[in-house]
Structures are given as C-alpha cells and as structure tokens.
Image: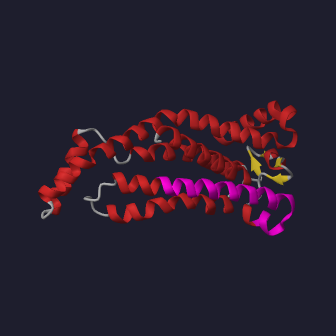
Amino acid sequence: MSVFTLFADLVQHLADLLQPLFHDSAAAAAIVLFTAFVRLLVHPLSRSAARGARARAALQPRIAELRKRHGKNPEKLQRAVLALHAEEKVSPLSGCLPSMLQLPAFFLLYHLFSAEEIGGRANELLSHTLLSAPLGDRGTDALHAGGTAGLVYGGLFALVAVVAFFNYRRTKASMADTAPMDTPGAGAITAVMPYMSFFTLATVAVVPLAAALYVVTSTTWSAVERAVLCP
C-alpha cells in the first residue's frame, strides 16, 4: 500500500468522523485539522527560529562595530561576521526549516486532490466539497465560473491577501533589522524576501482547493505564531 493510499484513507476516515458536525464540508474541516496538526509538529522549530531572529537582532551592534573596523576590506568583514554568527551559534537559515518541513504535507494534499485514481481505484476524495465548491477544483477555474465556488475562492483570496500583507510588513521590518548585509547577495535577498509572502496568492490560484486550504490555514497560523513569538 502506497503512502498516498494510506494518506487518502486517513483523510477519508477523519472526514467521516467530522461529518456529523460539518456535513458536506467534513473533508475540508479534516484538511484544516490536518494542517493544524502539522503546524503543531513543527512548532518547536518555529520557536527556535524566533529565538534565532531575536539573537540575530541582538548581534547588530557588534556587527556595526565590525563594519567600522573592517569596512575597507569586504572579505575580512564577511569572515568576521560569519565567525561572529558561528561563535554565538546563530544560524541565518533557521527560519527556513519550518516551511521546508511542511512541503511534503502540501505535496501529499496536492497529489491526492489532483489524481483521478488512488491505489488503483477511483479517488473518492474528489467528491467532497467546501460549501459546494469541489475540493479538487482550481481557483482560476472557480473564479471564472463564478457561483458558490467563485465566492469560496474569493473569500480565500481575500484572507490570504490580508495575511500576505501582514507577513510582508513583518518580514520587511525583520530583514531590515537583522539581515547580514556583509555577505554576498544579502542586499538582493533582503529586498526580495518580503515579497515572497505574496507568492501564496499565486499558489492558491493554481492548486486544488484542498491544497489551497492547507496554504491558507498554514499561512494564517504562521502570522499568528509570529505575532506571539516575535511581538
């Protein structure tokens, strides 16, 4: 039995359990609960990333001193900044781990609600809906068709746009305060990273509604988590 079959059975059983409460939207509720479970699993890494962000911010006065001392020697300045991060055990990549570890869960949902068959049989999950919007439909098709499906996707787009703008402002402020500007390409990364928050809008538009629910739930969780951990 493949991992896709096992996961499909898990989602279906969870939907069956939630059916008395959510009726035709039980599978959608199951996806939201699954997303919350994944986020709980990676929460310790999110807390670690938040501590790393605070530690990088605390290093900025010392990095400013290094700039004054080695400002005319970029290579020496870069080595000194990297050595400082190593000495304080601060990793600039720690904030990426929670997002990277969620990718398998996202791609599982994408596959489950894109495939006509799972394990050699018809994919029953495609019959599930969220307020009459099929979980296997794409946002671009639903918005073009209008009706209830268009309204559902319109609501998701509005929510993810608000969350993306919130994350954009937080990321921009964080990168300005803590980005190591003395490493190659750091300036370009600092300029681009805040806008990555809006990538979720494009993702929600082209993936099945089930995967879009995962993205919306996860990004909303991230926004709340960042507000709590990094006030």
Residue 36 part of the magenta segment: no
Q: Is residue 43 visible?
A: yes
Q: Determine the residue positioned at 52% across, 38% down.
A: 228
Residue 50 position by quadrant? top left
Q: Is residue 73 left or right of residue 5?
A: left
Q: Is residue 220 left or right of residue 55?
A: right
| Residue nearer the viewer, 94 or 123 | 94
The residue at the far top in this view is 17
- Report the number of discs: 0
Q: Position of residue 67 (x, y in %)?
A: 18, 57
Q: Determine the residue positioned at 17% across, 53% down.
A: 66
Q: Is residue 91 visible?
A: no
Residue 153 position by quadrant? bottom right
Majority secondary structure of the magenta segment?
A: helix
Q: Determine the residue positioned at 21% across, 45% down.
A: 84
Q: Quadrant of the N terminus?
A: top right
Q: Is residue 2 above or below residue 200?
A: above
> From which residue to which does the magenta span run?
141-170
| Residue nearer the viewer, 116 or 224 | 224
Residue 146 part of the magenta segment: yes
| Residue nearer the viewer, 63 or 151 | 63
Q: Position of residue 43 (x, y in %)?
A: 52, 35
| Residue nearer the viewer, 153 or 51 | 51
Q: Determine the residue positioned at 48% across, 32% down.
A: 44
Q: Position of residue 132 (x, y in %)?
A: 86, 52
Q: Position of residue 30 (x, y in %)?
A: 74, 38
Q: Is residue 92 left or right of residue 168?
A: left
Q: Is residue 229 left or right of residue 12?
A: left
